[in-house]
Amino acid sequence: MPHPLLASANEASKPIWLVTEQTWTEIAGSLPPLAQGFAKAQGFAGKAGSHCLLPDASGELFGVAFGINGTDARQSDPFLPGKLSTLLPEGVYRFETEAPNPTLATLAWLLGTYSFSRYRKRNEKAVRLVIPHGVDAEDVTHIANAIVASRDLVNTPTNDLGPDGIEAAARELADRHGASFTSIVGDDLLKQNFPMIHAVGRASITPPRLIDFTWGKADAPRITLVGKGVAFDTGGLDIKPAASMLLMRKDMGGAAATLALASMIMDAKLPVRLRVLIPAVENAISSNAFRPGDILPSRKGISVEIGNTDAEGRLILADALALADEESPDLIVDFATLTGAARVALGPELPPFYTDDDALAADIARHGTAENDPVWRLPLWYPYQSQLDSKFADMNNTGGPMGGSITAALFLRRFVEAAKAHVHFDIFAWNNATKPGRPEGGEVQVSRLMYALLKERYGA
């Protein structure tokens, strides 16, 4: 069923005129004199992001004028109309003039209404939108629901969402779609050869685990998603400063993005064989915590010296990627809030991605732009591999002081050999400030673009 904030065309609704500074004069001329005069008195001129509530003769709401971006694609934001769902009085509205991208405008309308209400009651209002012509309401609803559910996961603090909570969320999703589900927990990780997942998570009171579920026909194209599920990262014995721990509940943002994409895939019933792997741990501190200088075995047989216990995400991903690679899937996609270096290079809103597959990279960049889910390709610069050298083991888990996102990607690449293609996303999973369709707090990055890509490649 369509989202409850979407309305049908036969419902009474108020018009929204989406205008630019160039088109406002013409549109204003078509409005009743009272509405024209009121807009002029308010100084409304169609500036992007501005709005004006237009009255009728009785003082009731006649309609809304809202400024959108002009023709310069570099400055445009397809999500901008989503700002309206937080501005307007309760009621039903329709776009009287077509949005530049009706689907993204509708999605932004739904996503902009999101608020995290688990611990504090919010005053929510039903600001509903008539489904614009050509918009697939069911698909937009599935996407919005997947993102909202995963935003809730990222926003939930670790006292209520540890590794076991991540497992519960994954199990609920798998059960809802009839997927087969397993979880390897605690010392069973050692018995089944996942030593690095065990090492990173063993100091927590909540045991580490590898979550694994599979959906779809066995003979369909094999797509494997791997998500970093660090429920909280103290940094381990290389402890983080206090200020750096304040957002560490979001260190499972890779797992959240993975579950969001899996939800979209299964809701759309894409003809793929989907596998989801989430190593879920808490990087805690105790007498049995792994140490700087330890040398860990890995599932792949590569020994890893620990240069820093705060570079733990790549360790748990490595064991999961090695398992994923054993099936030689058509595509492995991993999502991880992996490095601060990625934020230094590109900021919080533009995640870097890494792949050796140029055709895949081109598709990712194209869909990132089309879906308003931006990314930027950075190189797997193999000369930097020497920064991961160790005198005592096959490799170190940290590189030098520069190029940290690249060396992290190179570390992960060592654990994938048989897959036909592999892409790694280094995401932030958080909005530092509210923007249209993206309220401040936990965010799902990259999942929408990958859903569009997979739908294009494998959709019916």
Image (cartoon, helix red, strand yellow):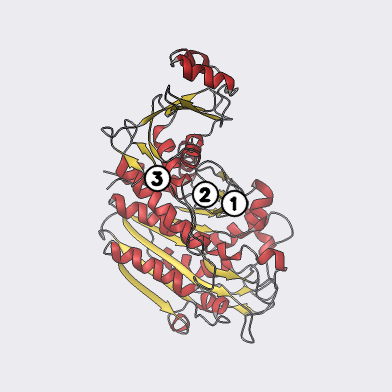
State the residue position of label 2.
Answer: 356
The number of numbered badges drawn on the structure is 3
Determine contact: label 2, label 3, CB under 8 Å: no
Residue at disc 1, secondary structure? loop
Mark 2 or 3: the one toward you: 3
As drawn, the residue found furthest toward the right would be 401
- Residue 23 versus residue 180: which sits nearer the camera? 23
Q: Residue furthest bottom?
A: 287
Quarter of the image for residue 172 reads bottom left
In the rendering, at what x and y percent does residue 412 appear?
55, 62
Image disc number at residue 188: none
From the image, which quarter does the C terminus lie in?
Answer: top left
- Which residue is rendered at x = 54% and y = 83% of the image? 205
Q: Position of residue 240 (x, y in %)?
A: 70, 69
Identify which amino acid the numbered label 2 is placed on. Asp
Q: Is residue 44 left or right of residue 225?
A: right
In the visual, does 283 lie left or right of 239? left
Q: From where the camera sits, is residue 82 visible?
A: yes
- Answer whether labels 3 and 1 touch (C-beta < 8 Å): no
Q: Position of residue 377 (x, y in %)?
A: 57, 45
Question: Is the Cβ of the residue at disc 2 closer than 8 Å to that at disc 1?
Answer: yes
Between discs 2 and 3, the one toward the N terminus:
3
Where is 358 relative to 276, above or below?
above
Identity of the amino acid at label 1?
Answer: Leu
The quarter of the displayed image where residue 167 is located: bottom left
Front-lying residue, 148 or 237: 148
Q: Amino acid at mark 3?
A: Ala
Q: Name the residue that disc number 1 marks.
A: 380
Secondary element under disc 3, as helix, strand or loop, is loop
Residue at 56%, 25% in the rendered image: 72
Residue that carries the numbered disc 3 in the rendered image: 126
